[in-house]
Image: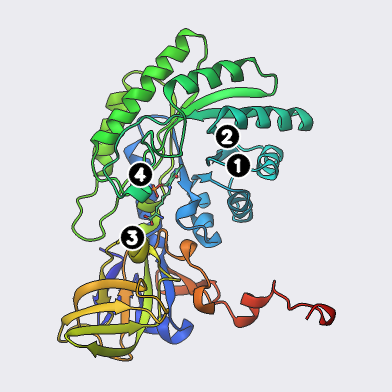
Amino acid sequence: MSVFASRNGSLHVEDVPLTDIADEYGTPTFVYSKRAIIEAYTEFHQAFERHPHLICYAVKANSNLAVLNILAGLGAGFDIVSGGELQRVLAAGGDPEKIVFSGVGKQHWELSLALKTGISCFNLESAEELHLLNQIAAQLGVTAAVSVRVNPNVDAQTHPYISTGLRENKFGVSDSQALQIYRQAHEMAHIAIKGIDFHIGSQITELSPFADALARILDLVDQLEKEDITLAHIDVGGGLGIRYQDEAPIDVQEYASCVLQTLGNRRQKLIFEPGRMLVGNAGLLLTQVLVTKHNGEKRFVVVDAAMNDLIRPALYQAWQKIVNVADGGNPSLCDVVGPVCETGDFLAKDRNLDASAGDLLAIHSSGAYGFVMSSNYNSRNRACEVMVAGDQSFCVRQRESFEDQVRLETILPNHLQ
Ligand code: LLP
């Protein structure tokens, strides 16, 4: 049964009515389902049971400590892109030996911290990064395990802002550059070559870009083998899409068959970096209608969540399903907008929705790239985050206060005023 279902006139998350959540924690609030996270992880894990693998959850999708802790408990590894994400994973009880470090611009302190922590692998994005890493590892007297992120020049057929595997994108290196980097790495005293990786984009709903990218990477794996550079793992990145509207997301079983078939009889361990597909549909944003108004023909439903809470509609023209938490009603065409002073501040356009002042709305599919991309724009306190487990709800991040917002700011001392 879906973790989001309507019962007794109110939408529930697992066994908790959203009306109770609004009463207890206020709005806007991100609400996550523990069960949905566990189910998504388990489905992925089981699909690859036949082959050695590690699922490194892409922390960027939702880095709440409670989310990371649930995944760590399931045995997940983590794909991080910053020192901050590394610290979060450790704080949430993640295993350092299951962490891979991605990202096109890792800083000195981040490399150093990750080396001291003993993470599993650095996904290198340039020769410069290799040299810096070798140097820091030498200073620390340790060895850094590395993989090279290859840009396979494959069109992921997704929104241009979240496509990463084309030559014109900043990510990864070409096959020939990768070979050079591997050859240099092979000679370095403080570097151990561990794998190869790629990530071609996000919200991908076609299998063929994955198969094409993997096939290209395998050519390189075979070529490296001829040079006596053997790899222990192949990291195929993340990017599996979810259903927001009427997309037909890739079936995880089919994805597994496709990856394993392309892999052939190679025995390298597979690493995955899924983010969205583990948490995207495990969360929603609960918001309350402040007012409804008409400008000419147009009806606006103004809610207490805004682009600072959920920027995906404004930034990627993303469509996320919005429903009234209460059943029934008389739907009519409207735009759902927030209180932020920008025309770009919309959560949905041209929706048929029943919504009056005081009603609660649920914006579905907000578990990934929701809270993590939120800001204090217009000096709005960032939303509260709640995790539901069965018939219980827990506040996993308090709503910010004004004091939280200004804690790091100060006004000029008297003599400079
Ligand atoms: N690995 C790497 C190296 C990545 O850059 C990403 C996402 C992932 C894994 C996870 O991808 P996923 O499985 O979640 O698709 N804010 C955008 C999405 C940006 C994705 C960035 N990289 C959105 O809201 O659609």
* Among the two numbered marks 2 and 4 on one chain, the one whose residue lies closer to the N terminus: 2
Q: Residue at x 26, y 31 (%)?
A: 258
**Label 4 crowd bin: few (<14), some (14–19), many (20+), radius 10 Å:** many
Q: In the rendering, which numbered label is found on residue 122? A: 2
* Among the two numbered marks 1 and 4 on one chain, the one whose residue lies closer to the N terminus: 1
**In this rendering, the label closer to the viewer, 2 or 3:** 2
In this rendering, does residue 380 appear at all?
Answer: no
Q: Position of residue 146 (x, y in %)?
A: 57, 28
Question: What is the three-letter code of the residue carrying label 2?
Answer: Phe
Q: Position of residue 218 (x, y in %)?
A: 37, 21
Q: Position of residue 79 (x, y in %)?
A: 51, 44
Question: Is disc 1 placed on a helix, strand or loop?
Answer: loop
Question: What is the three-letter code of the residue carrying label 3?
Answer: Asn
Question: What is the three-letter code of the residue carrying label 4?
Answer: Ser
**In this rendering, the label closer to the viewer, 2 or 4:** 4
* Among the two numbered marks 2 and 1 on one chain, the one whose residue lies closer to the N terminus: 1
Residue 348 relative to residue 411: left or right: left
Distance CA(mark 2)–CA(mark 3)? 29 Å
Question: Is disc 2 placed on a helix, strand or loop?
Answer: strand
Do callouts 2 and 1 mark residues in contact (Cβ within 8 Å)? yes
**In this rendering, the label closer to the viewer, 3 or 1:** 1
**In this rendering, the label closer to the viewer, 3 or 4:** 4
Count of picture labels: 4
In the picture of the structure, the residue carrying the numbered disc 1 is 106
What is the quadrant of residue 53 in the picture? top left
Question: In the picture shown, does residue 334 fall above or below 183?
Answer: below
Q: In the rendering, which numbered label is found on residue 281? A: 3
In the picture of the structure, the residue carrying the numbered disc 4 is 163
* Among the two numbered marks 2 and 3 on one chain, the one whose residue lies closer to the N terminus: 2
* Among the two numbered marks 3 and 1 on one chain, the one whose residue lies closer to the N terminus: 1
